């Protein structure tokens, strides 16, 4: 990694758009990222930083292995994937939550049988129920987890909820918040030592803009 330019991995999609919005407000020229074409690495013309566009789990991989100094990724991915890095800042966008949801009218906690839970996030689900001291069977679902209780595969789901409209449309109701989620700025542990002044400068720029918005 060059000591001259930092490299930041951005989660593609909505978090990328929100990151660009924040960086532009901080005075960074993000024109190359806004019109990326097929390129995945983009130099920010007026700041010593290159942006890498990646899927959320890969953002953590790139930061953890030090090929990127920093990353912007959702807390959902951090909770599910884990990893060795510093989580330095809540960027206050991409807000949603993990919720435990059941079929309307069902009594999830009113039984002694082992409950079955469907989720795309088995590690988040496991940690939540371990804290409660509950034994559950977790079934990983890749697609629409709302189907699992409808088809009576599971008693409940753990999933990301923004408005709750999808749950409602499928006769499900959230009964408990599992974890709050938002975009976070993460930093490679070695980079924090090697490029401390540059990284601190960038973090402080982010903090000033977030304070201005608050």
Image (cartoon, rainbow, N blue to C red):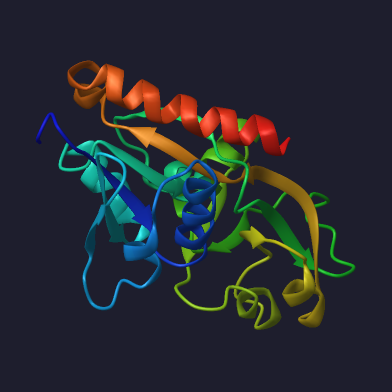
Q: Is residue 50 above or below residue 90?
A: below
Q: Is residue 126 above or below residue 30?
A: above
Front-most of residues 24 and 14: 24
Res. 133 visible in picture: no
Q: Which of the 4 image quadrants contains residue 179? A: top right
List x then y, in percent, for residue 104. Answer: 86, 70
Residue 92: x and y, percent?
62, 42
Please state, as top left, top right, bottom left or bottom right, where the C terminus lies in the image.
Answer: top right
Q: Is residue 70 left or right of residue 163?
A: left
Q: Residue 123 in the image: x percent, y percent? A: 45, 47
Q: Residue extending furthest right?
A: 105
Place of residue 169 in the rendered image (x, y in percent of width and height, measured from the top left):
79, 82
Q: Residue at coordinates 70% horizontally, 55% vertically from top-left?
A: 100
Q: Is residue 156 above or below residue 50?
A: below
**Is 59 left or right of 152, judged from the image as shown?**
left
Residue 3 visible to an observer of this rendering: yes
Q: Would you identify the image quadrant in which residue 63 lies?
A: top left
Q: Nearer the viewer, residue 99 or 210?
A: 210
Quadrant holding the N terminus: top left
Circle count: 0
Q: Is residue 24 left or right of residue 165?
A: left
Q: Is residue 60 above or below residue 106?
A: above
What's the residue at 28%, 78% (across, down)? 37
Q: Kindly identify the residue that appears in the image at 48 percent across and 71 percent down.
A: 141
Q: Nearer the viewer, residue 166 or 38?
A: 38
Q: Residue at x 23, y 65 (%)?
A: 40
């Amino acid at each position: 990694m060059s000591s001259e330019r930092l490299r930041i991995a951005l989660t593609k999609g909505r978090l990328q758009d929100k990151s660009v919005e924040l960086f532009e407000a901080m005075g960074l020229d993000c024109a190359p990222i806004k019109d990326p074409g097929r390129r995945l690495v983009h130099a920010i013309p007026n700041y010593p930083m290159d942006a890498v566009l990646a899927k959320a789990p890969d953002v953590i991989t790139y930061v953890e292995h030090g090929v990127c100094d920093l990353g912007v990724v959702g807390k959902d991915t951090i909770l599910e994937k884990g990893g060795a890095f510093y989580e330095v800042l809540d960027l206050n966008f991409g807000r949603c939550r993990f919720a435990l949801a059941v079929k309307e009218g069902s009594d999830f906690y009113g039984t002694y049988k082992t409950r079955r839970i469907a989720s795309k996030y088995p590690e988040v689900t496991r940690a939540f129920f371990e804290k409660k001291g509950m034994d559950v069977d977790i079934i990983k679902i890749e697609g629409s987890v709302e189907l699992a209780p409808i088809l009576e595969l599971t008693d409940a789901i753990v999933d990301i909820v923004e408005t709750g409209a999808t749950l409602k449309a499928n006769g499900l109701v959230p009964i408990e918040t599992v974890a709050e989620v938002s975009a976070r700025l993460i930093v490679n542990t070695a980079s924090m030592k090697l490029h401390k002044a540059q990284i601190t400068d960038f973090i402080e720029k982010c903090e000033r803009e977030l304070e201005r918005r608050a």
